[in-house]
Amino acid sequence: MRLFDRNQMAMTAVVRYPLRSSMLLVAIAIGVAAVLVLTSLGEGARLYVTSQFNSLGTHLLFVMPGKNEVGGLGGMAGSLGGSPRPFTLADVRALGRSPYIDTTTPMVMGGANINYQGLERDIGVLGTTHTMQRLFEYEMESGRFLPELDLDNASPVCVIGDTIARELFGNAEPVGKWVRMGDRRVRVVGALAQGGQSGGHDLDEAVFVPIAFAMQMYNRESVMRMMVEVTSDEAMVKAKKDVQDIIRARHFGHDDITIMDQGTILNTFNKIFLVLTSTLGGIAAISLAVAGTLIMNVMLVAVSQRTAEIGLLKALGARRSQIIGLFLTEAIMLSLLGAIVGVLVGYAAIEFLRYVYPLVDFQAPDWAVVAAVLTAVASGLLFGIMPARHAADLDPVEALAGN
Amino acid sequence: MISRDVISFTQRAVLFNRLRSGLTSLGIAIGVAAVVILTSMGEGLNHYMAVEFSQFGTNNIRVAPGKPETMGLGPGIMNTLRPLTIEDAEALGRLPYVVATTPNRIGRSEVEANSRIRVSNVIGTGPDMADVFQLEMAAGQFLPLDDPLSPRALAVIGATIQEELYGSSSALGDRIRIGGSRFRVVGVASPKGDLLGVNIDESVVIPAARAMELYNVNSVLDITVRFEEKAPVDEVVASMRRLMLARHGVEDFNIATQQQMMEVLGSVLDVLTIAVAALGSISLFVGGVGIFTIMTIAVRERTQEIGLLRSIGATRWQIQNLFLSESVVLAVMGGVMGLLLGGIVVAIVSVTIPTLPVRLSVPYIIAAELVSVAIGLIAGVAPATHAARLDPLEALRTE
């Protein structure tokens, strides 16, 4: 039997029972489409985070006080309490003098209540410098971002998020008004445009103040974290070393800061998302196993319905391997067709997701598509073997008689 | 046809082609097992958190800075303008029913002892902490009852710290340096592991006032209040709120009972469990497609039989029942198999990987069984209706 004949026969069998074949296709297609859609959720989330990160530019360093292991609750305790030696504004200024460093953006975060004409709100406070706007490309609704000040200058000015502007001022113009934060009076110099969200902060509920002002308000001498913009990609390694050397020299020989570049942080994120995506894909792939039982079942039915045909083939001299090949081809053909339908349906569903949530770049990772198709075909092969062997083991005489 | 006949007909139909019936049920079984296993992980996590929370009794209340509506970790956890002080903790301790209060302040510092250095967690707290969190001592004692505002510089070290800095020699009475300040070790804690997110073994415990001094802060992170077990919770919370209002003037604090904290956490985990159950149900759906296919084939194969039954007086309704009950039986068999399969896997996991909390979730099991019955019904309707609509004469004539 030639390859062409075999495929031809299998194809005829597929077409001859349209209902049965199409149900098999549906079952496999559901499984494959589910894998594609679910992994696209995980991948979409990963790409979203990555693009948010990369929009910051590629040559950034993140510096935190304390020698912490990345992530984990040990890191949290460090940012809550503080490290043995403070990471001061003087340190920040010293780092800014490195030839490899373009800008330094120190940050202090905290909570406070903001008050305007009897209206009060709980807000997140971000003490930082004017360079922050350049890094994150904040858009202003009105006024301007924090002015360029000396690091030590604790001018009582602030930039407020959109929700705060609306809650406290309604439709009135907030810029130029004086609000009360804690027990200090602060002048609003700008309001951010709505919908800003960066680095996990909800900017609509945030208030920006000069770093020195925030450190005074919270009575602390240590910066909580700092972003360093390096002059160029090539200078990254040198800049990293420079930061380390400068801090070591200033902190009496102690390496008590943690320096991370985007690569390290992205790697951590990628690992987390990979686990998430493959878990989702794995759960969806269980349905492919279920589809496998259906393949086996349908092929068994096919064998019993075509007993006479098998008997005829055997009587004509078809070998055992040829009979097996015939039925396996049919099983694989069905599962492959199902997988193709599934991929198409999956991509359509993903397109729909993109249409509904244009912000997130949903897309099934290539490995998931390949794995889904391979799993479908493999289950066709695996669950097709038993019925195929069953067919091959039929006694030709009995089979011809139709028993 | 009486119901006994339906049963025996169905039984024979299912048993006639055992392999086929088994495979069809297996499809549903895999789906049910997936739901059982996945939800048991969610349920296990839920149970683990509940145990973790209530291991210290359920009579704890947490006071944190920040407005009442801000649940969870607000921005105030890093810096706040509304300090919660040791004096607040002292005042709360004098309320009726309250048996213990512990102000908490955590940080991270270098600990230097025995000419070795290790960066570790620093927990600033009060002498009641050992009772509240049931911390046991391997050697020495916990922080003694000192003046809470100016306590002596004493420290209790965790098991890992003892191991790393002192090895097998005793740390008791030794002077250690925590972030530049000197402390004397009065106790070594027994290994305990994580305590609400902070690894106690990797920590040194010092008086709260000393920790605030060390980190130059004027506020504690939170205050844990423990009240008498049989005390009315609402009354305790109300009296705490009155006291704090009187002390602070405005409601700049957040009082959450353990019950409330657990509810918030529980609702998050519930959503997670529902999500994984839904994902697992995709397999159930595919299993349903399987039943539909097999039932359709069965109707085709038994067309003659249907024609015979109709011609000797079986009604359409009875024919429909016959096939519907067959598909439901297949689904139910799958449901039971899946439950067994899932239960076995969960049992194996809980024995072999004790750190992974798994626990069968009865509501989800019931839901999965009901869904599998429903799938059997829905998948069976179309083929059964088709069978019932067959023309008896045509059906008898087919081969």
Image (cartoon, grey):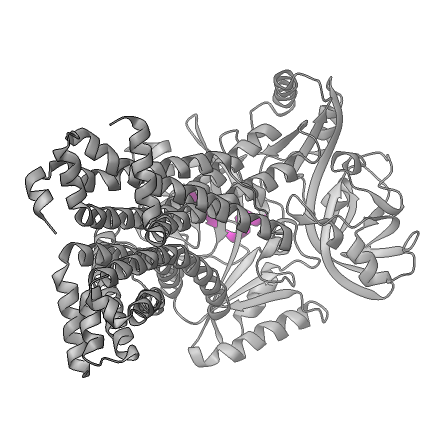
- Position above or below: B107 against A319: above
Q: Nearer the viewer, residue A102 or B47?
A: B47
Name the side, left or right, on which A274 lies relative to A11: right
Q: Where residue A129 appears, x then y in whole percent?
A: 46, 56
Q: Image quadrant of residue A403? A: bottom left
Q: Is residue A237 magenta?
A: no
- Which residue appears farthest toward the bottom when viewing the image? A2
- Position above or below: B87 against B174: above
Q: Where residue A57 appears, x then y in whole percent?
A: 38, 68
Name the side, left or right, on which B298 lies relative to B204: left
Q: Residue at x 32, y 51 (%)?
A: B17
Q: Image quadrant of residue A91? A: bottom right
Q: Which residues are magenta?
A: A206-215
Q: Nearer the viewer, residue B130 or A244?
A: B130
Q: Nearer the viewer, residue A303 or B211?
A: A303
Q: Is residue A212 magenta?
A: yes
Q: Nearer the viewer, residue A140 or A176?
A: A140
Q: Residue at x 65, y 23 (%)?
A: B247
Q: Residue at x 46, y 40 (%)?
A: A186
- Position above or below: A114 against A5: above
